[in-house]
Image: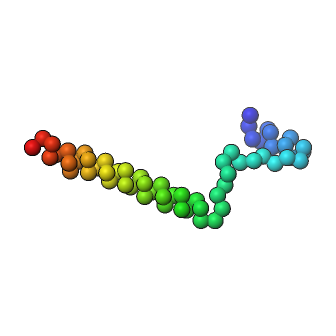
Amino acid sequence: MDEHVVRPYAEAAGRTPAPLFPQPEGDVLLFAFLMAGLVGGWVLGYGYRALFVEGGRRGA
């Protein structure tokens, strides 16, 4: 169902639609993106090292 169809009926009944995911307040969202960036950077760095730095030593 489209939101534009359901929203008027929900508002007429006195109910407001709840968000699908809870919205973080303050700097929690910024902290979550920081942690995701740190973890993603570590995974990419570890993968790069395993593929290109240590991978060349195995053939020697």
For the C terminus, the image quarter is top left
* Whole-percent x, y for residue 31 in the image: 54, 62
Q: Is residue 10 left or right of residue 25?
A: right
* Residue drawn 66% across the image and 62% down it: 25
Q: Is residue 59 left or right of residue 29?
A: left
Q: Is residue 37 left or right of residue 60?
A: right
Q: In the rendered image of this protein, does residue 42 appear above or below residue 6?
A: below
> 15 or 22: nearer the eye?
22
* Residue drawn 20% across the image and 48% down it: 54
* Whole-percent x, y for residue 26 in the image: 64, 65
* Whole-percent x, y for residue 29 in the image: 58, 59
* Residue drawn 89% across the image and 47% down it: 14
Q: In the rendered image of this protein, does residue 26 appear above or below residue 6?
A: below
Question: Of all residues shown, which one is farthest toward the top?
Answer: 1
Question: Of all residues shown, which one is farthest toward the right?
Answer: 13
> 12 or 17: nearer the eye?
17
Question: Of all residues shown, which one is farthest toward the left?
Answer: 60
* Whole-percent x, y for residue 37 in the image: 45, 57
Question: Of all residues shown, which one is farthest toward the bottom?
Answer: 26
Colouring method of the image: rainbow
* Residue drawn 80% across the image and 43% down it: 7
Counting every numbered tag in the picture gives 0
For the N terminus, the image quarter is top right
